[in-house]
Image (tube, helix red, strand yellow):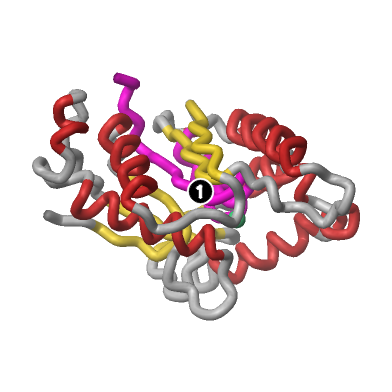
Amino acid sequence: MPEPAQVMVITPHPDDAEIGGGGTVAHWTGEGKDVIYVVCTNGDKGTSDINMKSEELARIREQEQLTAAKLLGVREVIFLRHPDQTLEDTPEFRKEIVRLIRMYRPETVVTTDPYRRYIWHRDHRIVSRVTLDAIFPYARDVLAYPDLLEQGLQPHKVKEILLWGSEDPNYRSNITDTFDIKIAALRCHKSQISDNSSSGLEERLRERHKMMAEGEDYELAEAFHRVEILR
Ligand SMILES: [Zn+2]
């Protein structure tokens, strides 16, 4: 059984975790918290390069994700390697997430918000819905998976969920000191950054994170919808 981790970030594609919560992750690892990533898809459709092959892109994106995670001090990256744009809310996928939650026993799970209206990547919607179900009640309930119990995977209660990309943020994390490392981690995802988007990347994100910090006594924030699980 692996060492438990305080924080598990469950992310649809390589690069989403850095966009949604890279500054917060850097803050946590700087405090000595153990953070692990679960990357659900291999991101093999994420290109506008007509000459790029899916297998090659998946290989590149995995390396980019490892480099970015290392920079942020993430302890371990688990790749589930589902093909991009194919995730469904199935019992199999749910069990895969339950198994990992029971193995690593995180206090906090971070993922994307499933309840964004209108345009939202289907993989994002599915990953977060399945993650919320996996946390409660499936990872918690002793009789949910007798076979996992037999394998020594005891039930586990997650205490806190943070959802990025939310239309209804109720929690902000101060990333003023970790903004630069967030940008550096994002730049590791070279296959996802065109020359055009690269030039204004830092300025655009600084503006976005300033807006998220509006009303606070610090400059830059990442915003989440936070759910505390009391039972
Ligand atoms: Zn994504």
Q: Residue at x 83, y 59 (%)?
A: 197
- In this orientation, does residue 52 appear? yes
**Above or below for 59 versus 222:** above
Q: Nearer the viewer, residue 6 or 85?
A: 85
Q: Is residue 14 left or right of residue 165?
A: right
Does the stretch in magenta take in 17? yes
Q: Is mark 1 within 8 Å of ligand 1?
A: yes
What secondary structure is marked by label 1?
A: strand
Name the residue type under label 1: Thr
> Which residue in the protein does label 1 denote?
11
Task: Say whether residue 199 is left or right of residue 34.
Answer: right
Q: Is residue 177 visible?
A: no
Q: Report if residue 139 lies within the magenta region.
A: no
Q: Quadrant of ligand 1?
A: bottom right
Residue at horizontal 58%, vertical 65%?
Answer: 121
Q: Residue at x 29, y 30 (%)?
A: 103
x, y percent for residue 98:
29, 42
Q: Which residues are magenta?
A: 1-29
Give the quarter of the figure containing the C terminus.
Answer: bottom left
The picture places residue 111, in percent across and down from the top left corner, at 44, 53
